[in-house]
Amino acid sequence: MTGTDGRRLDFVRRGQGAPLLLIQGMAATHAMWGEELLGALEQHFDVVAYDHRGVGRGDRADGEFTVADLADDAAAVISSVGWTDAHVFGISLGGMVAQELVLRHPAAVRSLVLGCTWAGGDTGVIAETSYRMVEAIASRDLGRGLRVSFEANFSPRYAALPGTRELYRQRALAVRMPVPVVQLQFRAALAHNAADRLPEVAVPTLVLHGTADAGIPVSNGYRLAELIPAARLELFDGAGHLFWWEDPARAAALVVAHATQGDLRDAGGRGG
C-alpha cells in the first residue's frame, strides 16, 4: 500500500462490504484496534487499517510532517486500494488526520467518525497526561513507556481488570513503533488546528469520546460536535482514551449504524 509520493505504508485488510478506513493515533499501530473491534467491523465492511508513515514495515519517515501531510497519505491509501471513497474512522491523532482528510479531499469521505480527538486551536485541550506519556516513551525505557502509556490510555476501572496490562503490552509491541516517529507525531498533533474550517464539513459525522479520557479530555468531543454541522456526539461513560477497548461492542455498533445511515442517505439522494 502506498501513501503520498509512493511512500510504502504497513496495513491489514479484512472483511467484505462497504469500504471503511481506520486511522490510528499517536504511538499506535493497526494492532491497537484489537481483535474485538476488527472482528465486529469486518462482518459489515471491507476494512483497511493502515499505519502512519515511519511505522511497522512501512518506509522511514523522512523528517517533520504535518497532520495535513498525514491526511494526504490517507487519501493516497484510499486510492491505492482501489476505492474512490470510504467511510472513515479516526481516533486521537487519526481523528485529526480524518478532519484534514475530509477538508482537503471531501470527495474521498462518505461518512466520518471522530474518536477521542480534538479540533486544535486556542480553546482545545491536550492534558498534561499526554505530555508525560510522550516523555516516558522518549526515555527509551520500555517498561516506563508501557506503564505510563497504559495508565494514560485507560480508565482505572478497565485498567484493574485481569489481563488488561499484558494484553496492552502484547499489542503495543506487535508492530515496530520508532520513538522518533512518536515525537514527530506529537509535534504534528500539537500544531493541528482545523477549528475554523470544521463548519465546512458536509458529510455525516459521529463524535465518540470517553468521559474519563485523561489525555484528550471530553470537552474536546463536545467542541467538535458543536463545530461540525449536524454532528452527533456519543459518550462512553467512565471510559478512558481507548474507549473502543473498554466497550468494543458498542463502538462497533455505533460505527456500523452511522455508516449504514450515511449510505442510505446517499442512496436516497441519488434516487431523487
Image: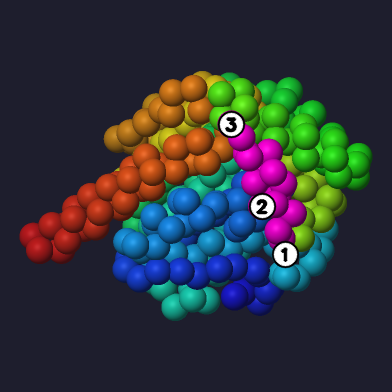
Give the secondary structure at mark 1: loop
**Position in image of residue 262 (x %, y %):** 26, 52
**Position in image of residue 254 (x %, y %):** 33, 43
Closer-to-camera residue (62/237):
237
User: Which residue, given by chain and number where applicable, does mark 3 sit on?
Assistant: 161
Looking at the image, residue 68 sits to the left or right of residue 236; the answer is: right
Q: Which quadrant would the C terminus be assigned to in this image? A: bottom left
Give the secondary structure at mark 2: helix
Looking at the image, residue 136 sits to the left or right of residue 231; the answer is: right
Residue flagged by tag 1: what amino acid is it?
Answer: Gly
Q: Which residues are magenta?
A: 161-175
Closer-to-camera residue (92/211):
211
Above or below 25: residue 62: below
Give the CA distance from mark 1 to mark 2.
13 Å
Give the CA distance from mark 3 to mark 1.
29 Å
Q: Are marks 3 and 2 in contact (CB under 8 Å)?
A: no
Task: Name the residue rendered at 79%, 53% in the picture.
Answer: 181
User: Which residue, given by chain and number where applicable, does mark 1 sit on?
Assistant: 56
